[in-house]
């Protein structure tokens, strides 16, 4: 794995990790969930096999990418993905994302349909609902006023099932470390972006093959939100993963990789 940077259209440097040979048969661009980074995808990459080339991004405001002042827009995050494809010389890719990253993937599919081989949407949504602006503002302000550590107990139970937390303490601790390393102003702006996001009007026009996975116990983007996506995207498939919560790529890397590979081979 190598970490690279490329400038976006507004000059923001976007970091991305490259796994495998960039001329491999199957090409994937993957975007992590809120407050994670490119390493979120490491276990999924391990399952994708030798024919996969993967660009795992640090979304703007996260990881090794620049953290510009807000406001942020989901469409800008999607265009950042296109910039990474340009840097790699990739005309098209399967684009996948989890939670926030899934929303970015949706926006990419809407804005760049000719570059979208397929969409892998994991524990995500096109819209968080009528109260979302206030809900997300409250979460961001809690981080500002009380620090990111004040959100850890809330995050842990949303991210993983109780059984997974007991059985994989290393994954839980690593996720917590990445979360706590975030830049608070950028976190606040990303929360505001998610609160204001509404991609519903564009989702119905998506024609790329789409696979939707959601944790059975996900109460951050519950099954009903995944079902709404499946209903709106013609030909999409929906799979509910048993005994999983919000970060199913960490709980079910094999199943997530299989869905991505199915899109690449379609």
Image (spheres, rainbow, N blue to C red):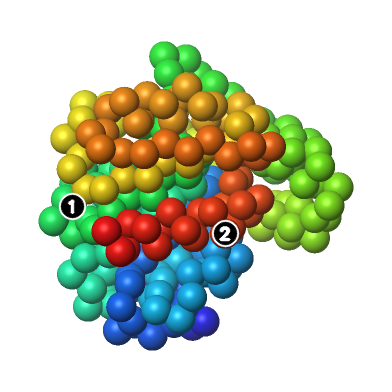
Pair 2/1: label in front: 2
Task: State whether residue 2 is above or below residue 206.
Answer: below
Q: Measured from the top left, where is residue 30 in percent x and y?
A: 42, 60
Dot 2 or dot 1: first in sequence order is: 1
**In contact (CB < 8 Å): disc 2 and disc 1:** no
Q: Which residue is mark 2?
A: 254
The local crowd at label 1, few if under 14, some if 14 to 19, many if 20 or more residues have their Cα within 10 Å, is: some
Q: Quadrant of residue 140?
A: top right
What label sits on residue 112 in the rendered view? 1
Q: Measured from the top left, where is residue 153 in percent x and y?
A: 78, 36
Numbered disc 1: secondary structure = loop
Q: Measured from the top left, where is residue 202 in percent x and y?
A: 20, 33
Q: Quadrant of residue 260?
A: bottom left
Task: State whether residue 96 is above or below residue 149.
Answer: below
Q: Nearer the viewer, residue 210 or 175?
A: 210
The local crowd at label 2, few if under 14, some if 14 to 19, many if 20 or more residues have their Cα within 10 Å, is: some
Work out how far the residue at label 2 is from the one at label 1, CA to CA, in angstroms: 28 Å
Q: Measured from the top left, where is residue 155 in percent x and y?
A: 70, 38
Quarter of the figure that contains the C terminus: bottom left
Residue appearing at x 69%, y 37% in the figure: 243
């Amino acid at each position: 794995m190598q970490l690279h940077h490329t400038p976006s259209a507004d000059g923001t440097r976007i970091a991305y990790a490259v796994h495998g040979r960039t001329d491999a048969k199957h090409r994937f661009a993957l975007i992590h969930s809120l407050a994670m980074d490119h390493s979120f995808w490491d276990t999924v990459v391990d399952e994708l096999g030798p024919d996969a080339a993967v660009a795992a991004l640090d979304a703007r405001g996260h990881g090794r990418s620049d953290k510009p002042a807000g406001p942020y827009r989901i469409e800008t995050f999607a265009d950042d993905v296109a910039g990474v494809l340009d840097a790699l010389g990739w005309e098209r890719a399967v684009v996948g994302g989890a939670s926030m990253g899934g929303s970015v993937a949706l926006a990419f599919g809407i804005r760049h349909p000719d570059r979208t081989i397929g969409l892998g949407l994991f524990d995500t949504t096109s819209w968080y609902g009528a109260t979302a602006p206030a809900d997300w503002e409250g979460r961001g302000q809690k981080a500002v006023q009380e620090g990111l550590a004040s959100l850890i107990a809330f995050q842990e139970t949303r991210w993983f099932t109780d059984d997974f937390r007991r059985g994989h303490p290393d994954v839980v601790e690593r996720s917590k470390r990445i979360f706590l390393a975030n830049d608070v102003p950028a976190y606040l702006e990303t929360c505001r972006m998610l609160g204001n996001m509404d991609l519903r009007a564009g989702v119905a026009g998506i024609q790329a093959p789409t696979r939707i996975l959601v944790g059975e116990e996900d109460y951050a983007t519950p099954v009903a939100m995944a079902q709404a996506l499946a209903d709106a995207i013609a030909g999409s498939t929906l799979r509910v993963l048993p005994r999983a919560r919000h970060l199913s790529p960490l709980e079910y890397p094999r199943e997530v990789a299989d869905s991505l590979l199915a899109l690449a081979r379609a």
